């Protein structure tokens, strides 16, 4: 009797689980089609240098405009793309397109591209990256790859070998979302990392939480002692900007300066020569 009760309980939940699975399957089918059709846009968010106030480069951020659901966040579809084996094709496309676009920017500007651990762990990854910059005619020093701490946790030897190979070509490495994962500053000694991107959750609490300020100060100091750049993500207020500048942070990125822009809007901003944060109010 107990067994059949158990079965009944299980069946009770079954239809609901089925709907979730079906919805996910549907999204997976649509994502597969979108990848095949290259039905994505890449938006570019300016990275601002604190010392000069100029745009030093941009981060490429993927956008999927779903036919019926509208814009779906990469935070939602990137994990799905990883799960169903699409991330390599999608990631290679983003890399190639981003390099092509960046080749049209002023030569001091860099492009930062997010890389999934699955994509990074492919044996051919470093070779593909070298091919992408060469085909785009982009100097390798103008490409920055954003990796996450999770990648540095396992397969250290392979990861180190690939990172070293990339560094030898001249490509820069940024450690993204620093502070959210396993956050060991020892990574900085073991791996060739050029930039630390301080996660926006710390920046959000910066002006009203002493502990966030202390953590950011520590990261900035350790990075500076190893000749590394620090970038603060998610800067939304001038108070945050001023405090980060005082601490000695190198770069910033956030809605205070600019959201991720379509290429036309980015090109307009670049040719205007305006520092986004200091832009005068639009004239009538
Ligand atoms: P991320 O790499 O940490 O990118 C920064 C995210 O913060 C972006 O979200 C950006 O739009 C958002 N952001 C920028 N400034 C601000 C701000 O001032 N306030 C707040 N609240 N948010 C801000 P987005 O575009 O939704 O991307 C989410 C994540 O998806 C990215 O986080 C990245 O991990 C992933 N992603 C995006 N594009 C790609 C891609 O081409 N490949 C891979 N593998 N992952 C990608
Ligand atoms: Mg990123
Ligand atoms: Mg980030
Ligand atoms: Mg982030």
Image (cartoon, rainbow, N blue to C red):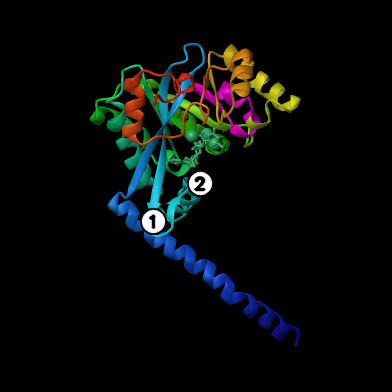
Q: Secondary structure at mark 2?
A: helix
The image shows residue 126 at horizontal and vertical percentages of 36, 32
Extreme front residue here?
A: 284
Label 1, on which residue?
31
192 lies left or right of 92: right
Tell me the number on the disc at residue 242. Answer: none
Q: Which residue shows up at 63% across the image and 75% down it? A: 13
Q: Which quarter of the picture shows residue 220? A: top right
Residue 196 highlighted magenta (yes or no): yes
Q: Which quarter of the picture shows residue 62? A: top left
Judge: label 2 CB < 8 Å from ligand 1.
yes
Tell me the number on the disc at residue 75. Answer: 2
Disc 1 crowd rating (10 Å Cα; few below 14, some 14-19, many 20+) is many
Q: Which quarter of the picture shows residue 205? A: top right
Residue 220 highlighted magenta (yes or no): no
Between residue 70 and residue 85, name the one nearer to us.
70
Q: Secondary structure at mark 1?
A: helix
Quadrant where the C terminus sits is: top left
């Amino acid at each position: 009797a107990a067994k059949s009760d158990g079965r009944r309980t299980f069946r009770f939940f079954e239809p609901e689980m089925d709907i979730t699975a079906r919805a996910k399957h549907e999204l997976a089918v649509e994502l597969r089609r979108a990848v095949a059709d290259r039905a994505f846009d890449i938006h570019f968010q300016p990275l601002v240098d604190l010392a000069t106030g100029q745009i030093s480069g941009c981060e490429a951020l993927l956008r999927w405009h779903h036919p019926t659901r509208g814009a779906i966040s990469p935070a939602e579809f990137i994990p799905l793309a990883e799960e169903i084996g699409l991330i390599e094709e999608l990631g290679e496309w983003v890399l190639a397109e981003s390099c092509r676009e960046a080749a049209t920017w002023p030569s001091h500007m860099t492009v930062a591209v997010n890389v999934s651990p699955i994509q990074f762990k492919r044996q051919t990854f470093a070779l593909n990256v070298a091919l992408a910059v060469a085909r785009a005619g982009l100097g390798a020093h103008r490409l920055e790859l954003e990796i996450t701490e999770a990648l540095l946790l396992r397969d250290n030897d392979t990861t180190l070998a690939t990172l070293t190979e990339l560094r030898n070509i001249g490509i820069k490495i940024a450690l993204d979302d620093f502070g959210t994962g396993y956050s060991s500053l020892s990574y900085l000694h073991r791996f060739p990392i050029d930039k630390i991107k301080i996660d926006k959750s710390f920046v959000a609490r910066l002006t009203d939480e002493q502990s966030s300020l202390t953590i950011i100060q520590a990261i900035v100091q350790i990075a500076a002692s190893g000749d590394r750049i620090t970038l603060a993500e998610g800067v939304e207020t001038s108070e945050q900007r001023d405090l980060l500048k005082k601490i000695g942070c190198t770069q910033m990125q956030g809605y205070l300066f600019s959201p991720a822009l379509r290429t036309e809007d980015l090109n307009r901003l670049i040719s205007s020569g305006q520092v986004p944060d200091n832009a005068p109010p639009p004239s009538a």
